[in-house]
Image (cartoon, rainbow, N blue to C red):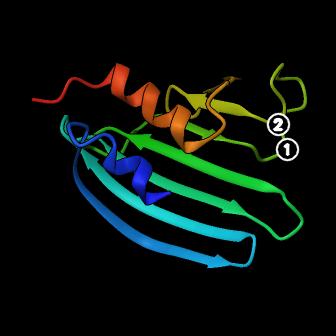
């Protein structure tokens, strides 16, 4: 998974891998990153032995206020992309999301952030 981040060198100032464990078909990945606009990204991406994929990607302003958080926790059944959803406006709004993996997340960030 880390190789996906290295494909976006103009996006990140720093990358800190907190966990990158592969156990058979399972994969547990945690990363903290600072982007060139000084925002911060926290990534949790896990694939379990039964094939379940659970993720949470949190993008924050330099003051740690929420820009967006994408996840697939199954607690918003009315969202059209259930269980995938995004939290915006400091968690006041939950909306449908097509960002369901790290590749889509990085493509979104690349188009949203203008590195200096």
Q: Is residue 108 above or below residue 70?
A: above
In the image, what residue occupies the spot 43% across and 48% down? 4
For the view shown, which residue lies furthest in the left direction?
116
Point 44% across, 36% down: residue: 106
Q: Nearer the viewer, residue 1 or 67?
A: 1
From the viewer's perspective, tell me whether residue 23 is left or right of residue 67. right
Q: Is residue 93 above or below residue 25?
A: above
| Residue 84, numbered circle | none
Between 67 and 112, the one nearer to me in the picture = 112
x and y percentages locating residue 70 in the rendered image: 60, 38
> Which residue does the numbered mark 2 point to in the structure image?
83
Q: Give the alpha-carbon distance from disc 2 to disc 1, as whole Å.
A: 5 Å
Helix, strand or loop under label 1: loop
Position of residue 62 in the picture relative to residue 64 (left or right): left
Task: Pinpoint residue 114: horizontal percent, then vertical percent.
Answer: 21, 23
Provide the secondary structure element on which disc 2 rests.
Answer: loop
Circle number at residue 74: 1
Sequence-wise, which precedes: disc 2 or disc 1? Answer: 1
Q: Which residue is rendered at x = 80% and y = 24% of the image? A: 81
Mark 1: few/some/many CA within 10 Å (<14, 14-19, 20+): few
Q: Quadrant of residue 100?
A: top right
Where is the C terminus found, in terms of image quarters? top left
State the image coordinates of residue 14 (x, y, percent, origin top left): 22, 56
Evaluate whether residue 14 shows in this view.
Answer: yes
């Amino acid at each position: 998974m880390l190789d996906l981040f290295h494909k976006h060198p103009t996006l990140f100032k720093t990358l800190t891998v907190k966990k990158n464990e592969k156990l058979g078909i399972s994969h547990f990945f945690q990363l903290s990153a600072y982007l060139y606009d000084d925002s911060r990204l926290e990534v949790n991406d896990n694939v379990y032995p039964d094939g379940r994929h659970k993720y949470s990607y949190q993008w924050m302003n330099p003051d740690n206020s929420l820009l967006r958080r994408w996840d697939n926790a199954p607690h918003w059944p009315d969202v059209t992309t259930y269980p995938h959803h995004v939290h915006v406006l400091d968690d006041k709004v939950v909306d449908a999301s097509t960002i369901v993996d790290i590749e889509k997340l990085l493509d979104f960030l690349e188009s949203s952030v203008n590195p200096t």
